[in-house]
Amino acid sequence: MARLQLMTAYKEELALTDLHALFRQIVDVESVSGREHHLADLVEQALSGCPHLEVLRQGNTIVARTDLGRSQRVIIAGHLDTVPVAGNLPSRLEERDGRAFLVGRGTADMKGGVAVALHLAHALTTPVHDVTWVFYECEEIEATANGLGRVAQTHPDWLAGDFAVLMEPTGARIEGGCQGTTRFRLTTHGTAAHSARSWLGHNAIHELTDLLETIRAYPVREAVEVEGLVFREGLNATIVSGGVAGNVIPDTAELYVNYRFAPDLAADDAIAAMRRAFERPGVDFEVLDLSPGARPGLDRPAAREFCAAVGGEPRPKYGWTDVARFSALGVPAVNYGPADAGKAHADDECCPLDDLDATRDALITWLTPEERS
Amino acid sequence: MARLQLMTAYKEELALTDLHALFRQIVDVESVSGREHHLADLVEQALSGCPHLEVLRQGNTIVARTDLGRSQRVIIAGHLDTVPVAGNLPSRLEERDGRAFLVGRGTADMKGGVAVALHLAHALTTPVHDVTWVFYECEEIEATANGLGRVAQTHPDWLAGDFAVLMEPTGARIEGGCQGTTRFRLTTHGTAAHSARSWLGHNAIHELTDLLETIRAYPVREAVEVEGLVFREGLNATIVSGGVAGNVIPDTAELYVNYRFAPDLAADDAIAAMRRAFERPGVDFEVLDLSPGARPGLDRPAAREFCAAVGGEPRPKYGWTDVARFSALGVPAVNYGPADAGKAHADDECCPLDDLDATRDALITWLTPEERS
């Protein structure tokens, strides 16, 4: 702790062997999306000094991998970028209820996981599985910029493997897979008229009634078991708008709907189900985005070993994360990392230091069981 | 027509004896709401020269009345102001389908009626009923500025009478009374949550469903006979809004509703009915405005004579107009004036000149039947 408190801004070389110091160091290297180059340079430089790793780079995404000829390869990934700083850098240490926290932008989402991965990439020279470590850019902004997505498109072989761990904040518990999500816009149409003679018009807001009734009556599944985890779906109107003035019959109205579906449902099937439910004469149906879910893959041998090493009961992941990008490549993936997801993006974003230790220890147990036993 | 085409801007004295010339003259004296003083001065000056009239003034509202000791008194009223000019002044003459129109701001709403009233206030020295002529300010803006409303508050005796004619544009047909109107806002409440875990929240947009169903099921009356006219009510959502983002369960949503009710229903009863229909736990009910309707009063002797003089079948007035101010004073009132209401406020606002003649002739037949017979 004393040493950690003396750390301030980054140094030109990462303290790979001291997890807590390393954590604070990379938190204090500001790396808002699009400006990750300095942190990426430091990561590349640090990993290039490890003789057991092959280091690859695309943009500000760094991939480092062992080549030990193991029968299985696992991927451990984290993103380097953060949402914009809100007066919460440099980081500060705080004690809360007897636990030590590092507080500041990126501590929860997700430089704690990045620190653990960097520390172990350096330390684990002979893991039981070959490991591909991925540190990528631009996770917090538009999907087209996402470094993991770009590598998946241009160098899918860099991401080949049997199982992946994405070090998103989960409070050091396994959250398996993720649900799919689609957003679509329903537009109703009518005929404008003065509200004093409303029968000369046709009210587009009134046409929303059936659509809202359909949402409320839709049979979303409350318990869907997929590879050992139970997911819960949701179908919700998120935005509604329509009308121009208090005395005009509105000729158009819009309803935005978000459907979160369990990962046993393919994205195309999810959209088809929504079209069956909502498409009707006079209603425009426009898909705004569609992201497939990810199966947790907890029945795979490497995943079972991982679950045993971490302990506890894996939970389903409801929110969409980049694990779905692995799933799309045929690599089952889970979320697992230090810090509470509820603190992600918060002004008082923080990570308990003991979560770092627990995460590190679990990964060591998984990847070098002979050293731990 | 030749003389009319030579008229350009106003002169310092109104041409009271020439209806078409007078009409063009007062159209070309710009009098947007709040800037009626010049036109009001001209009106006051012209009427003060009529020995059979007593002239009163409050602000830019001019009242002129006979005092012949007749058993009945009728009121003929029009507003001097217009909505803002839109490049449509000075006025121009146009022939359309063989009819001569004056085109420009205020021609329809409602300087045609004002011209007829001014012309007749000067000409009819011995009408069969005593007549109170009213030329008032600020009809097109907020209700508190309305000149007729202000006189009703401060000098209700100036508006005493048995029957009133408001010279709003009706295409020279009688439109009786007017419907009441109220606007209210319904606000639903929920609990915000991330849409990936929607069951942790409560969706305020979904709570609109019952309210919209209530609107659609509400028994609005499609044919309500009131003093010889049949009114048709309407209940409509006019504006809907709610939601902040495509991945957030909304914690509030708003629905604006407009109820137009037949003039047999008192304003308080209309609001009470709306409260019974829409008030429920979790929904805020807020009245935004409430304007009572006006009974047409076509069963009164002066009204029956008026209908006979005008001819044709009186229609109900659906939109709210200042006739309701007379109704509130106990004076039944109808709308009757030249020009098509559909052209009011339009950039190509216009009035056919033969509507002026028809309106003038009907009022003369009503008020001086012995001279016409």
Image (tube, coloured by chain):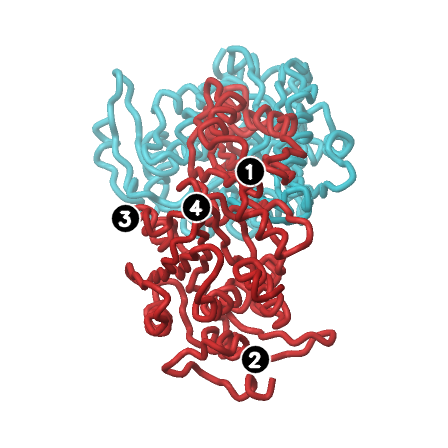
Chain colours: A red, B cyan
Say what amino acid the circle numbered 1 marks: Arg
Say what amino acid the circle numbered 4 marks: Phe
Task: Determine contact: label 1, label 2, CB under 8 Å.
Answer: no
Question: Which label belongs to residue A92?
Answer: 2
User: Dot 3: what SS?
Assistant: helix
Please tell me whether mark 4 or mark 1 is closer to you in this view.
Answer: 4
Cα–Cα gap, marks 4 and 1:
19 Å
Cα–Cα gap, marks 1 and 2:
37 Å
> Label 1 crowding class (10 Å Cα cut-off): few <14, some 14-19, many 20+?
many
Q: Earlier in the sequence, mark 3 or mark 4?
A: 3
Residue A364 x/y as whole percent: 55, 64
Q: In the picture, residue B123 is in which quadrant? A: top left
Q: Chain of mark 4?
A: A
Say what amino acid the circle numbered 3 marks: Thr
Q: Work out whether residue A71 can be spotted.
A: yes
Q: Earlier in the sequence, mark 4 or mark 1?
A: 1
Q: In the picture, residue A84 is in which quadrant? A: bottom left
Please tell me whether mark 2 or mark 4 is closer to you in this view.
Answer: 4
> Label 3 crowding class (10 Å Cα cut-off): few <14, some 14-19, many 20+?
few
Residue holding disc 1: A260
> Label 4 crowding class (10 Å Cα cut-off): few <14, some 14-19, many 20+?
many
Q: Chain of mark 2?
A: A
Residue holding disc 4: A326
Residue holding disc 3: A154
Cα–Cα gap, marks 2 and 4:
34 Å
Q: Earlier in the sequence, mark 1 or mark 2?
A: 2
